[in-house]
C-alpha cells in the first residue's frame, strides 16, 4: 500500500511539471471553447497500451468494479491532498459542450488509451520496464488524448449562485440552528433544510450509504432508482417556487429550463407538460461535505451512470482549500476549478476524488440528466413526510408495500434447452432475487396435497421465495425455473392458475433431437450429488440411447398418441426395420390438434413418474403439443418463447436476456457479466440412423410449432 501511495504521489508531481498549458484563471473568467489540435502520437499510445490491458473494455470494466476503500487509505489520500492543494495547478478550462454518453459506457480506466499509463507507472506484471522519461512521455500523451479526444470535464458556464447559497446556507455547516437568518420574508431562509428531522417531515428522507457514512449532509430535490424507471420529485422541488427560481439560472445554462424561449409562444397544457426540458433531470441534490473529509478516488457505478450527464455546481466553497480532481486514471487526474457558480460536467465513469481542507462545509449542487432520446420516465411527486424503502439499486414508496406478489416469472421448460443458463443470466440483474431454490417444483412433485384451500396453497408455494423480505420492495422481482412444468400441462396448469395466475412465463426450446440426447446424457451421468442422482432415476442406466428412444415411441404408439407413425410394409421384415419408421402425413394432419390427440396426450401424462427425470425422452420434444395447452389457459402475452441456439451465436446471450428482461418488466439494456453456458456437458455422438429417424419424427411437429409461434420459427432447426 505504501508503495502504491508513493507511486501515486510521484505521478501527480510529475504531471504538475509537465502540464505547461495550465493557467491560474480567475474565478470570474468564462471558459473558452476548446481549439482542436492534431495529436498524431495518440494512436501509437493506444497501440502500445493493447499489450498491457485487455482489449475488451466491458471485460476490463468488470475487473475494475468498485470496492470499499479502507479507512487507512482514505486518511492517506487526505494527507496527500493536503500537500497537492498547495502545489497542484488548475487544469485549463474548456467548454466542450455535452460529454457524449458514448464515452461513458464503461469506466475510463478500462479504455486501453488510458490504461497504458497504469501499465507503465504501476509496473503491471509482465509489462516491459519503462524508464522515468518514458513514463512521463506516456503521461503527457495521455493527457493530450484526454483533452482532445475524450475529455473528462467540460465547463458549461458560469452563473450567479448567490440566491441559492442564501437559500440553503442555514444549517449547512456547523451551525444547525433553525433561526440564524434575519430575513423574515422568506420561510425557506429560516428553515434548516439540512436537518434530517426537518427533511423527514417537510421533504422526503433519502439514504445514500457512502455519503451518509462520511458525514455528508444532503438536501434532495429529485432522485431516481438505479435503472431510471422512476424519478421521485421531492416537495422542496415541486412545491417551493423559491427553490426552483434559485436553480433556474443553472438550468438555462444547461438548456434544461422550462421557460418559454420565444415571447408569445403558445402551446397546449398537455403538450407543454410532455415537452418540459426539466423532465430530463433524474437526480438533483445539494451535498455538504464536512471539513477534514476526503471522498477517496473512485468512479461511480450503477446503470444510471452511462445514461446520464453529471453536472457539478459549487455553491458554498473555498476553491483554494478544496481539491477536486478528475481524470481517466488515478495517475492522470487533474485539478478542477470549484469557484462558486462554475457549472461543469464531468464523466463520472472517470476517476475522481475531492478533499475538503477548509474549516467549513463545502456545498455543491449535483445534477444528472438524460438525453432527449432516452424517452419518457415515470415521475412521481412525493408528499411531505413520505417514506421511501431503498435497496442499493431500487427505491419504493412505503404506500406501495406488497404491490408485487411473488413470483413475477417462471421458466417452465423445456428440460435441457438452456433453462439453467437463462435463469442464471436473469438472476445477474440487480433487481432480480433468486428463489430459495432454482427448481422449486412446488406445482408438481413438491405440491402439498394437505393444503385444501386456495389461500393455504398460495401460502405454501410462496414459501419457496423470499416473499416476506420482498414485500416492501415491489421494484424487486423473483422467479422460478422448473422445466418439468411444460411437459405436464394437465397437472401444472390448474395449480398455476390457482396460485400464480399473473406469472410471466418463459419457454426455452432447443433442437428436439439434441435436447433428447442431452437429457439421456444427464440422466445416465454418475456425476453429481446424491440428491441429484436420486432425482435423475436409474431406469435408463443399463439402456443405450437408441433403446430409450424406441421405448418412448412405442409407449406413445400404444396409447394412441402417434397413430401417424408407421413402418413401411416393405421394411417390416428387415432386421433394422425400427429405423425405417416414418410419419404418414395424411393421418398426421387429421389427428394433430384433434380431441383424440388431446385425450391420448392426457393419458400419456398420467403414466409419467413424478420422482425421476428418466421419462418422456421423445415426447418432451413435441413442443407444439405442449405449448398449445398452455396457450389455451393463459393470455398469449404472458409467454416468451426462445431458442437455445439463438444464445449460442455472437452476442446471442445478451439479445435473448434483453428480451427476457423486457418480458418481465425490467429495463432491457442491462448487460450480464457471465455469459458462459450453465449445466452443460459433453456426450458421445449420435448414431446416424437414429438421427435420421428422429428428424422424420419431429419434422411435422416443428411445422406445427411455426403455426402457433409465427414466421420466425419457420425451419427452426432445418428439418
Image (cartoon, helix red, strand yellow):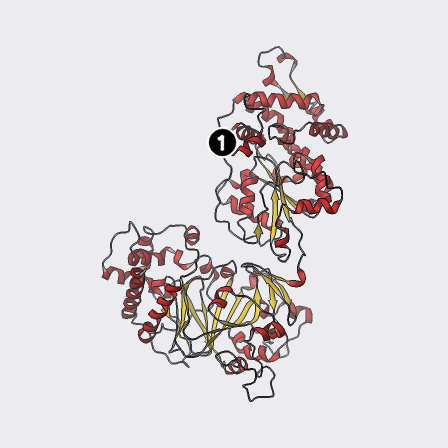
Q: Nearer the viewer, residue 304 or 212?
A: 212
Q: Nearer the viewer, residue 461 or 558?
A: 461
Tell me residue 678's x, y (percent): 51, 40
User: 167 above or below 453?
Assistant: below
> Which residue is pictured at 51% across the width and 25% down the height?
686
Q: Nearer the viewer, residue 626 or 394?
A: 394
Report helix, strand or loop for mark 1.
Answer: loop
> Which residue is pictured at 56% across the width and 45% down the height?
656
Label 1 crowd bin: few (<14), some (14–19), many (20+), radius 10 Å: few
Tell me residue 544's x, y (percent): 54, 21
Q: Which residue is mark 1?
A: 527
| Quadrant occupied by the N terminus | bottom left
User: 283 above or below 435?
Assistant: below
Residue 601 seen:
yes
Q: Is residue 588 left or right of residue 347?
A: right
How many marks are shown on the rendered structure?
Answer: 1
Tell me residue 202's x, y (percent): 62, 75
Q: Nearer the viewer, residue 629 or 256?
A: 629
Residue 280 seen:
no
Residue 339 in which image quadrant: bottom left
Tell me residue 190's x, y (percent): 58, 83
Residue 201 in which image quadrant: bottom right
Q: Residue lying furthest top in this view?
A: 573
> Which residue is pictured at 28% across the width and 65% down the height?
10
Amino acid at each position: 500500500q505504501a508503495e502504491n501511495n508513493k507511486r501515486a504521489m510521484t505521478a501527480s508531481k510529475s504531471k504538475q511539471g509537465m502540464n505547461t498549458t495550465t493557467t491560474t484563471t480567475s474565478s470570474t473568467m468564462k471558459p473558452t471553447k476548446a481549439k482542436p489540435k492534431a495529436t498524431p502520437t495518440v494512436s501509437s499510445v493506444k497501440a502500445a497500451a493493447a499489450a498491457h490491458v485487455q482489449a475488451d473494455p466491458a471485460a476490463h470494466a468488470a475487473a475494475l468494479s468498485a470496492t470499499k476503500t479502507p479507512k487507512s487509505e482514505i486518511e492517506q489520500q487526505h494527507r496527500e491532498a493536503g500537500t497537492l492543494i498547495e502545489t497542484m495547478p488548475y487544469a485549463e478550462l474548456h467548454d466542450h459542450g455535452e460529454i457524449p454518453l458514448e464515452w461513458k459506457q464503461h469506466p475510463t480506466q478500462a479504455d486501453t488509451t488510458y490504461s497504458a499509463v497504469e501499465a507503465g507507472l504501476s509496473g503491471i506484471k509482465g509489462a516491459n520496464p519503462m524508464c522515468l522519461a518514458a513514463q512521463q512521455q506516456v503521461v503527457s500523451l495521455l493527457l493530450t488524448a484526454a483533452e482532445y479526444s475524450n475529455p473528462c470535464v467540460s465547463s458549461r458556464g458560469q452563473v450567479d449562485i448567490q440566491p441559492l447559497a442564501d437559500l440553503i446556507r442555514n444549517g449547512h455547516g456547523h451551525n444547525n440552528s433553525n433561526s440564524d437568518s434575519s430575513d423574515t420574508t422568506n420561510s425557506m431562509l429560516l428553515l434548516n433544510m439540512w436537518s434530517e428531522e426537518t427533511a423527514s417531515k417537510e421533504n422526503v428522507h433519502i439514504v445514500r450509504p457512502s455519503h451518509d457514512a462520511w458525514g455528508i449532509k444532503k438536501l434532495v430535490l429529485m432522485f431516481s432508482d438505479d435503472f431510471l424507471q422512476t424519478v421521485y420529485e421531492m416537495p422542496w422541488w415541486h412545491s417551493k417556487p423559491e427553490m426552483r427560481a434559485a436553480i433556474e439560472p443553472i438550468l438555462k445554462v444547461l438548456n434544461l429550463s422550462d421557460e418559454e424561449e420565444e415571447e408569445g409562444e403558445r402551446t397546449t397544457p398537455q403538450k407543454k407538460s410532455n415537452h418540459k426540458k426539466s423532465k430530463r433531470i433524474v437526480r438533483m441534490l445539494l451535498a455538504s461535505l464536512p471539513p477534514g473529509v476526503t471522498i477517496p478516488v473512485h468512479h461511480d457505478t450503477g446503470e444510471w451512470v452511462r445514461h446520464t450527464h453529471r453536472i457539478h455546481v459549487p455553491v458554498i466553497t473555498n476553491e483554494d482549500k478544496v481539491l477536486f480532481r478528475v481524470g481517466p486514471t488515478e495517475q492522470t487526474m487533474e485539478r478542477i476549478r470549484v469557484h462558486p457558480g462554475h457549472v461543469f460536467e464531468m464523466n463520472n465513469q472517470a476517476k475522481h476524488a475531492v478533499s475538503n481542507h477548509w474549516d467549513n462545509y463545502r456545498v455543491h449542487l449535483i445534477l444528472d440528466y438524460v438525453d432527449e432520446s432516452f424517452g419518457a420516465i415515470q415521475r412521481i411527486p412525493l408528499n411531505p413526510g413520505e417514506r421511501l424503502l431503498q435497496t442499493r439499486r431500487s427505491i419504493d414508496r412505503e404506500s406501495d408495500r406488497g404491490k408485487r406478489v411473488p413470483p413475477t416469472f417462471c421458466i417452465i421448460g423445456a428440460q435441457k434447452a438452456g433453462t439453467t443458463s437463462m435463469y442464471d443470466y436473469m438472476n445477474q440483474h440487480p433487481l432480480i432475487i433468486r428463489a430459495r431454490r432454482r427448481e422449486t417444483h412446488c406445482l408438481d412433485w413438491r405440491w402439498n396435497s394437505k393444503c385444501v384451500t386456495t389461500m393455504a396453497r398460495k401460502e405454501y408455494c410462496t414459501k419457496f421465495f423470499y416473499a416476506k423480505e420482498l414485500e416492501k420492495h415491489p421494484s424487486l422481482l423473483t422467479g422460478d425455473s422448473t422445466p418439468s412444468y411444460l411437459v405436464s400441462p394437465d397437472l401444472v396448469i390448474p395449480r398455476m392458475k390457482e396460485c400464480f395466475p399473473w406469472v410471466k412465463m418463459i419457454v426455452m426450446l432447443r433442437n428436439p433431437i439434441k435436447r433428447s440426447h442431452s437429457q439421456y446424457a444427464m440422466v445416465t451421468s454418475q456425476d453429481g450429488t446424491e440428491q441429484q442422482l436420486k432425482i435423475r432415476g436409474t431406469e435408463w442406466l443399463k439402456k443405450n440411447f437408441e433403446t430409450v428412444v424406441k421405448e418412448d415411441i412405442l409407449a406413445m404408439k400404444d396409447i394412441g398418441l402417434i397413430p401417424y407413425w408407421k413402418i413401411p410394409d416393405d421394411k417390416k421384415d428387415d432386421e433394422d426395420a425400427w429405423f425405417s419408421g416414418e410419419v404418414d402425413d395424411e393421418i398426421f394432419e387429421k389427428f394433430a390438434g384433434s380431441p383424440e390427440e388431446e385425450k391420448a396426450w392426457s393419458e400419456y401424462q398420467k403414466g409419467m413418474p413424478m420422482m425421476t427425470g428418466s421419462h418422456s425422452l421423445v415426447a418432451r420434444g413435441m413442443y407444439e403439443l405442449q405449448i398449445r395447452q398452455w396457450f389455451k389457459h393463459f393470455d398469449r402475452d404472458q409467454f416468451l418463447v426462445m431458442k437455445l441456439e439463438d444464445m449460442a451465436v455472437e452476442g446471442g446471450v445478451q439479445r435473448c436476456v434483453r428480451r427476457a428482461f423486457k418480458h418481465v418488466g425490467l429495463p432491457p439494456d442491462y448487460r450480464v457479466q457471465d455469459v458462459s453456458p450453465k449445466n452443460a456437458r459433453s456426450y458421445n455422438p449420435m448414431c446416424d440412423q437414429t438421427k435420421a429417424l428422429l428428424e422424420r419424427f419431429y419434422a411435422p411437429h416443428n411445422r406445427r410449432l411455426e403455426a402457433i409461434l409465427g414466421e420466425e420459427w419457420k425451419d427452426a432447426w432445418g428439418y
